[in-house]
Image (cartoon, helix red, strand yellow):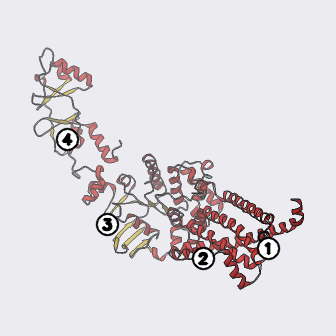
Amino acid sequence: MIQFEHVCKRYGKTTILEDLSFTIPDGQFVVLIGPSGCGKTTTMKMINRLLEPDGGKVLIDGKDAASMDRVELRRHIGYVIQQIGLFPNMTVAQNISVVPRLLKYDRERCDRIVHELLEMVEMPYDRYAGKYPNELSGGQQQRIGVLRALAASPPVVLMDEPFGALDPMTREVLQDEVKKLQLKLHKTIVFVTHDMGEALKMADTILFMSGGRIEQIASPEKMLENPASDLVRSFLGKHVTESGAVARIETFMRTNAYRVRKDRGVLECAEMMARNSVDTLLVTDEAEHYLGIVTIRGIKLWGKGLPNIETLIVQTPHVARIGDEAKESVDYLLESGDDYVVVLNADDTIAGIVTKTSVAKSVATTLWGDER
Amino acid sequence: MSAFFATYGSMLAEAIGVHILYVLASVAIGFVLGLALGVLLSRVPQWSAVLIPVMSIFQTIPGLVFIGVLFIWIGMRPATVIIALSIYAMFPVLKNTYTGILGVEPKYVEAAKGCGMSPLQTLWRVELPLAMPTIIAGLRMAAIYTVSWTVLAAMIGLGGLGNFVYQGVSSNNNTLIIAGAIPAAVLAIVIGALIDLLQRKVTPRGMKKEVGR
């Protein structure tokens, strides 16, 4: 357990951290996030005493970090930095076993650790152990950087924007791997990032900082549901709907519905449905006002010999308006078994339709970010 | 030619031997001193802003003057020559050690600290190995300079290849001057080549691309 009690930090006259208090329980994946200069890296570096607080205390498992030997302390806290920092004069195996060797583990034990860890990230020992860092790709280097931090099985691992320098694809893969490792090894991980997508994906708890203070501590869910301030909301950005917790119907709407004027011929409509593989068309009058729908079933049963579709128009039981709460229409879709809900603008023209598929798609986008 | 070797052969061999001994002794001492002082200075970079310029001034004192002063103080002993040459050999090593260590990218030092290395372990396992190419370049410079500075030993009658050069100059004998100069030049080239070889041997494969940056 890591506790911060009224921690302050100043550089000259500038206050970096102001009366910071929080607790990180064991086994949690905690992400520190916030605008640059908010003090997140400073906060993290106080845990392994790369920086010392000017006031207050940092407690690790109830003991004041300031009272421990800092070199000894660091050997029991893993540390991964953004610039990777693998020692270029050492092989992969030597880099991984840096901390075990500092702890005076014997050779066999070090070797076993290297074997196990390389296996865990699927980098065959025979192929990679003897390589030097400059012979690896960026992604492979940071994998080794993570392994170096894990080598002496520290209960706590600090990660300072570890994937910031990697390309998006590699970053994604490493995020998954680290998350998997954490679930498997139950480490307490303190992870600094400025990427909200990364934070939402990795964190059990997000600690949002700004100006040396905590803006909000919450699980990703809670933060999305209930951002504590406009700053948090702006960081959440695309991950949260604009009006906050209440989702509007237009979020889920698609605008490419097939529409026809009421004076169109029956056959023409049937042909249009066939061509676009739909069973329904939205019908409007000359001024584009919504009148109702025609279905392929209606055309089949009663369409023979009719000059146009006007008499075939039927009403739908539920019509939504732009600005309505989405919940009502989504509930209707789920309960009625209908395939869609028509959405109208204020002047009765058609804005679009909401289908089960469009709801599913936009829910997915909100949860996992825009993939494209 | 053969007449020359018949007359001077053994003297030349002895002079080369003495010369090499002076060079080896003073470069060895200078290297150790330079390395130690360079490391010390790198621990307190704020001092070196003062100390390094002062030493550079000291370095501009001509070797001739310095050996002369030491001669008055210590007398005509090999120690005089070795002390003077060691101090001169020390400077390039010291400067390169200092700049080499300060030139180690901060990320490596931070990673070393974060892994729990003590300051001494950080120096020994990370900073010195990473600065080694630069330090050896300093050693190379020191060794090559020392070969030529050792010629000055003859000025106070302590032998080496300088004997030939001085005798040649005073007796207006070009052959003698060349007999002293050529072995000195060859010696400088050979020592340079040996150190290059050492450089390649001690640089791990992972740092090869960074050599000579």
**Location of mark 2 (residue):** B58
Q: Are marks 1 and 4 in contact (CB under 8 Å)?
A: no
Q: Residue at x 12, y 16 (%)?
A: A306
Evaluate if marks 3 and 2 touch, with contact meaning CB atoms under 8 Å apart.
Answer: no
Choose the circle earlier in sequence order: 4 or 3. 3
Q: Is residue A178 visible?
A: yes
- Residue position for label 3: A211
Type of amino acid under label 1: Gly
Real-space CA distance between mark 4 and mark 3, rounded to the nearest whole angstrom: 42 Å
Same-subunit check for callouts 1 and 3 = no
Q: Which percent across, then down, holds residue A70?
A: 50, 72
According to the picture, the residue beneath numbered tag 4 turns out to be A329
In this picture, residue A350 sits left or right of residue A213: left
Residue B175, picture quadrant? bottom right
> How many angstroms separate mark 1 from mark 3 (CA)?
72 Å
Assess whether mark 3 and mark 1 are in contact (beta carbons under 8 angstroms): no
Q: Chain of mark 2?
A: B
Q: Are marks 4 and 3 on the same chain?
A: yes
Question: How far apart in space, not on screen, are marks 2 and 1 (Cα)?
Answer: 26 Å
